[in-house]
Image (cartoon, rainbow, N blue to C red):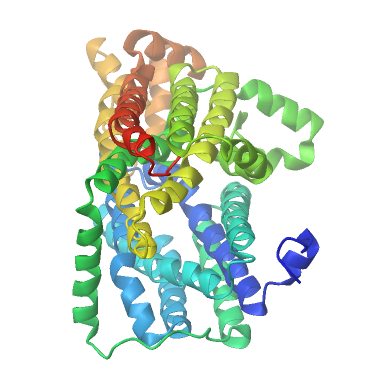
Amino acid sequence: MSTEKRSFIQSVKSFNKTFWIGSFMELMERWAWYGVFTLFALYLVGSTDTGGLGFNHIQKGNIMSDITGLLYLLPIFTGVIADRIGYKLSLVIAYVILIAGYYLMGTVDTYWSMYFVFLFVAIGAAMFKPVASAIITKSTDKSNGTLGFGIFYMMVNIGGFIGPACSSYLRTTYGWKLIFIQGSVVIGINLLMLLFFFKEPYREKVEKESIGKAIVNSLKKIWEAVKDVRLTVLLILMIGFWTMFNQLFYTLPNFIEDWVDSSVIANWINETLPGLGRTLTEDGQVKPEWFTNIDAGMIILLQMFVSYFVIKMRHVSAMIRGFIIAAIGVGLTFYTNNVMFTIIGTVIFAIGEMTTNPTFSSFIALISPKGKEALYQGTYFLPVAAGNFFTKFIAGNLYQSWSDKLSLLQGEMTERGIEMPEISDSFTKNDYFQLASEKLNMGKWEMTQLLWDSYNPNKIWYVIVGIGAFTIIALYIYDKLVIRPREANGNQIE
């Protein structure tokens, strides 16, 4: 049957067993990853008396940014290894590392121990990432590839939504450690699926060369691609998008926990939907991770709809519009401590993300010389990695200085000449807030409003939106000077 006459149901039925197992494993791996990562910023700086590690934001930024940045660089090497040793063995190694790594993350409590254990998890995730995409590629063809990767992307976001939702319930019902055990259990299910149901897809035989030489050749190919100025400039510009995007996980949860009063919504949930109270709320507030999870939920609901409109636009025009929408959205989330703006801003940002991110990957394919499409696509994760590395300066150093509620309160107490104990194992962050509230004779949110009015912790939005604005202008110039002239000369890009 021709592709044109194939119905949607027939197209779905055209996928083989390996495709569906690969898609399921992607969903589960994202469940485990985002089940930890979406709440990770809260856990790292959380008060020790509630199960958090009590780190400062600079330590948080270092752990999250350094390791996640490396995760997106490592597939350059792990992809080569997987091609040599086979997909099934690569996945066994990845899953064993992830099962052990997630469990260990729930047992360590010092900066360097968490740093290296999270690095261990990143190595496992980096082993998984290129194999998952390769399985889908090997399991689809020209007739169903677009739909196949659409389903695959949907699985990513379903896992990215379910993971934090489950972790949100687990952390308040059973404690923080359970979210890490959950990660191990979910990956354990993947391991069982792999061992009992997965069959190695056909792989073309590669030349017999050492893994070391193969990695060197891989790096040479990437260097060959980035020597194309058009591609390199585009990759540099996309660093701005990923730096903005990362604020959703690195900075926004802490900002919401510190400054946003969501009690009105929390009270409504507890009165109207009491069964969801434990999952969605804590201490009279909506849990911060649920605001972040709006992004994944919106993508699940609206990606197909947004993509329908985006395909009618020029690629660079769509990316510029997506950047503008995303910058407005992320700006709103940090500009005010009004909870409704937090929700609206996150929804707007999600629309910008849905417009920009898939278009970026498609645009790389358009500017790729014939026969070098895969080579150019291999550079996709370079700006993702760089964006993670740069994010720590905002989520770490800048947030610690400008927006950390504890730091600002400590400065306020010193300025007023009020003596306070140092944070220690016996005097936690929560103890400090409670004692300061008593000495200032203010309620929690009265004290929060005092700090907001005195120190303007929302000024961090200038930097975040500034990065977006710079990227928008630079992308416009790139389009005008590089892409449009090529289109005018008969080189079809659009």
Measuring 34% from the left and 42% from the top, which residue is drawn there? 426
Is 19 situated above or below 288? below
Please provide percent x and percent y for residue 457: 36, 19
Which residue occupies 45% across, 12% down? 449
Q: Which of 308 and 345 is in front in this view?
A: 308
Q: Position of residue 438 (x, y in %)?
A: 43, 17
Residue 141: percent from left, percent from top = 58, 70
**Most distant residue in the bottom direction:** 208
Residue with the most extreme front position = 490
Q: In this view, does 203 lie above or below 358?
A: below
Q: Is residue 411 left or right of residue 438?
A: left
* Residue 72 sits above or below residue 269 on the image: below
Of residue 207 and residue 112, the one placed in the foreground of this image is 207
Residue 118 located left or right of residue 256: left
Residue 429 in view of the camera: yes
Instruction: Give the tally of numbered discs.
Output: 0
| Quadrant of the image occupied by residue 351 | top right
> In x, y percent, where is residue 423?
29, 35
Quarter the N terminus occupies? bottom right
In the picture, which quadrant includes the C terminus? top left
Residue 51 seen in this snapshot: no
> Which quadrant of the figure has residue 451?
top left
